[in-house]
Amino acid sequence: MSTGPTILHADLDAFYASVEQLLEPALRGRPVAVGGSARGGVVLAASYEAKVHGVAGGMPGWRAAQLCPGLTFVRGSFHRYQGFADEVMRILGDVTPLVQRISIDEAFLDVSGSTHLFGPPAAIGALIRERVRSEVGLPISVGAARTKHLAKVASQVAKPDGLLVVEPDGEREFLEPLPVGLLWGVGPVTERRLAERGIHTIGDLARTDRATMERFLGRATGSFLHALAHNEDPRRVATSTRARSVGAQSALGRRTASPELVREVLGHLAERVAGRLRAKGRAGRTVTVRVRFPAMRSVTRSHTLSAPVSATLTITEVAERLAWQAIADQEQRSVEVTLLGISVSNLTRQEAVQLELPLPPPDPWRPGSPTGAARWALDRSMDAVRDRFGRSAVGYLPVTLGRRAGVPEEFRELAEREL
C-alpha cells in the first residue's frame, strides 16, 4: 500500500447533464434533467443547478418539476455520451498506464510512478482537471488519498468541479465528521438502518464494535463497512479489463411474485445480458439469479450448464427455474420481491455454434442442439435488426408487451457496458 496520497479517483460531474449543457449552450447555468417530463417518466440525471432544488436521478418527472419550476427536460443524447467519456479516459491514460475504469464516467488512477514526470498528486489532479475542461469541455472532480476508498470519498466531497487531497496524517480527522452515506456500499436503505442505531457519521461507525456491525448488517457487509470507516482498504488499482461475468438487475419496489412478473422481468434482464455476451463474442456456463425480498433479504441461486450459452431464451428459462427455487424456499404463501437480477459467469469465446448430432435425450439448453442452435441463430438475426433500426424494432413477445415506461434501453446499456 502506498504511503502517500498517490491513488486518485476522477469522477465527471453530473456527466449526462453536463454533456447536454455542453452540446446546447443555452442550457448552461440552468437546471436540466435528462429523461422524464413534467407529466411523468423518470429523471435519469440532473445538473447541479437542478440538484440544489432536490432533483435527483430516479425521481419521477412530475416530482422534479414540482421541486424545480424552471427545470428543463431533455431527452438525452445517448449516442454521444460514450465518446465524451472515452476522451476523458484517454487523458487519464496520458498521465499513468494504471487506470481502472469503474463506470462510464469515473476511474481510479495509481500515480505513484508518475510523480517524477508531473509533480505531486495535487499537481497531477490539477493537470487532469485542466485538460478535461480545455480538451473535452466537461467539469471533473478529483480526490487523492492513500487508499481507493478514501480517494473516492475525497472526490465526492470535492464536488462539484473540485480537487481534494487527503494527506495520510489527516485521514482520521477528515473521515470522522462525514456522513456515513459517503461510504462505498452504503445506500439509502442501509443509511436509514444505521441512523436508527444512532450511527450518522463515519466516526460513529468507526467507534462501533465490529462484531456489533456484523450482527446488524451481516458478517460480510458489517466487516467491510467497519474496515472502511477505519480506512482499511488494501485494494489496488487493477488495470485488467477482462470481465469475469456479465449481469443486470431490476429494482421492483414491492411486487407480489407472480409468474407473469417473474417471466417479464427475467426475460428483459436476459435480453440485456445475452445481447452483451453476443456483442463480445462470449458465452457462459454458469447462470446466477439474485432475488431480493423485503427487509433487504437476498437469496442467490446458481446453475452450471454442460456447455456455455448466450441465447436469450435459454438464459431466461434457467433464470426462471432458479428464481422460483428461491421464492419457493420462503415460508409465506404470498411472496413479495423487491429486486431480480441475472448474471452469467464462467465465460468463454463463442463466435459460432457447433451443431451436435441429434442424440437422445434432447437438451434444448445445449447451444449445439437443434433447439439451442435455432435460438442462437434467431438472436443473431435480432441483433442485426436492432443494430440497424434500434432496440425497439424487434423483441420477444412477453418482454415487448410487458415493457413499462421508464429508463431507456440506451441508458441501461451505457450503465452496464463492459468498459
Image (spheres, rainbow, N blue to C red):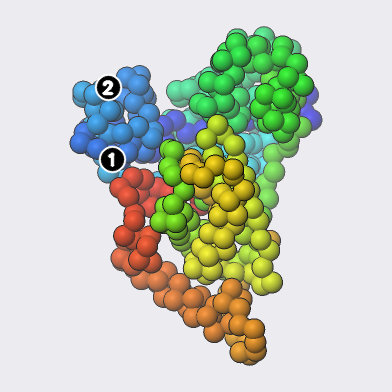
Judging depth in this view, the residue of 20 and 309 nearest the camera is 309
Residue farthest to the front?
A: 333
Residue 369 figure quarter:
bottom right
Residue occupying the point 63% across, 42% down:
99
Cβ atoms at labels 2 and 1 below 8 Å apart: no
Neighbor class of circle 2 (other Cα within 10 Å; few <14, some 14-19, many 20+) is: some
Residue 365 percent coordinates (x, y): 59, 73
Instruction: Tell whether 365 sits left or right of 22.
Output: right
The answer, for residue 76, to whether it is visible in the render is yes
Residue 395 percent coordinates (x, y): 36, 66
Circle 2 is placed at which residue position? 67
Residue occupying the point 73% across, 31% down:
219
Q: Does residue 289 lie above or below 2 as drawn? A: below
Q: Which mark is residue 19?
A: none
Q: Quadrant of the N terminus?
A: top right
Judging depth in this view, the residue of 301 and 106 nearest the camera is 301
Residue 197 percent coordinates (x, y): 61, 14
Neighbor class of circle 1 (other Cα within 10 Å; few <14, some 14-19, many 20+) is: some
Instruction: Tell whether 153 sits left or right of 260.
Output: right
Residue 14 figure quarter:
top left
SS at mark 2?
A: helix
The amino acid pointed to by label 1 is Gly
Disc with the residue nearer the chain's start (2 vs 1): 1
The amino acid pointed to by label 2 is Leu
SS at mark 1?
A: loop
Q: How many marks?
A: 2
Residue 180 percent coordinates (x, y): 59, 18
The answer, for residue 128, to whether it is visible in the render is no
Instruction: Tell whether 322 sits left or right of 263.
Output: right
Residue occupying the point 52% across, 35% down:
294
Q: CA distance from mark 2 to mark 1?
A: 15 Å
Q: Which mark is residue 41?
A: 1
